[in-house]
Image (cartoon, grey):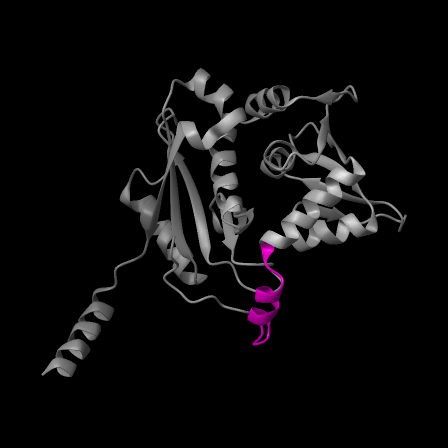
Amino acid sequence: MESTTRSRWKAKSFAEIAEANPMSGIIIKLQASLSESQAQAMLLDCSDALLEATPELSDLLNRACFGKQINTYDSGKQWFQLGPEEAFYLHHALHCSTINGETGNAMNAVEVWECMVSRNKAFPWLYTAYAHLRRKNWVVRSGLQYGVDFVAYRHHPALVHSEFAVLVLSDDDDGESRLRVWSDLQCSLRVCGGVAKTLLVLHVIKCSTKNELDSRLLYGWDEYTVIEERTITRWVPEHCREAHASDGGATQ
């Protein structure tokens, strides 16, 4: 997965700061802190989850870019609103948080999964793509403002601009997939070009029937799905001709 543009750090020293504080190390600290505090998130009607955090845990959540902090008057208590993919990743992939349902009782992974899918049928594919990028230590945030599913950062968004605009496709979309016509592709490429991002298409291919896949994803999704990564760029004839002419002059 290679970007067609260089990492755009927001200041000259930020690359060194990121190198000295790798995201993988921050995630390990967050995982340990959540496990030690026996963190419990409350599932909301919109499928997001609300997590109470101490100041120390709040700092780690912010550094690891999980959730959105909600400002309160009580400085001793802080709350984070986690998206469905974030909440399930902390619960299932990192095994460091509990999710409580509307009744207040803890839910197991299967119950959380079924609840998420009932509220958004695309959740299996979005979560698979989200977890795929997170496991590669990319910071993954919502891409709604760019018309995509996610945006991926090399490190914290305060240090660097996002490199990828991510679209998630699946082979079980009931004919509703994007990028089926050239106009969709052109629109996406123009938006990405205007904000200096590379369009990354993650195609999630199931290797079993839908019901089998939904259950197996809970225990080893990477063994039962194939993820195709494709970066797509807009071809500009003028640029290609200039590059060709330049190369030709250099070889003569």
Q: Residue furthest left?
A: 252
249 falls in the magenta region: no
Query: Over which residues does the magenta segment extend?
Result: 11-23
Q: Is residue 65 visible?
A: no
> Does 70 sit left or right of 7 as displayed?
right
**Is the residue 167 above or below the residue 170 in the image?**
below
What type of secondary structure mainly makes up the magenta span? Answer: helix
Residue plotted at (49% across, 68% down): 8
Residue plotted at (48% across, 22% down): 216
Number of numbered markers:
0
- Front residue of this view, candidates 145 and 204: 204
Residue 202, quarter of picture: top left
> Does 201 sit left or right of 19 as displayed?
left
Residue 248, quarter of picture: bottom left
Residue plotted at (69% across, 49% down): 29
Find residue 88 and report its horizontal and vertical position in percent.
61, 33
- Front residue of this view, candidates 55 and 180: 55
Q: From the image, which quarter does the C terminus lie in? A: bottom left
Find residue 59 and report its horizontal and vertical position in percent.
75, 54
> Does 151 sit left or right of 60 as displayed?
left
Find residue 207 and report its horizontal and vertical position in percent.
36, 25
Residue 237, quarter of picture: bottom left
> Does 249 sit left or right of 84 as displayed?
left
- Front residue of this view, candidates 72 and 89: 89
**Is the residue 24 above or below the residue 107 in the image?**
below
Find residue 156 and report its horizontal and vertical position in percent.
60, 58
Q: Is residue 87 visible?
A: yes
12 falls in the magenta region: yes
**Is the residue 156 above or below the residue 117 in the image?**
below
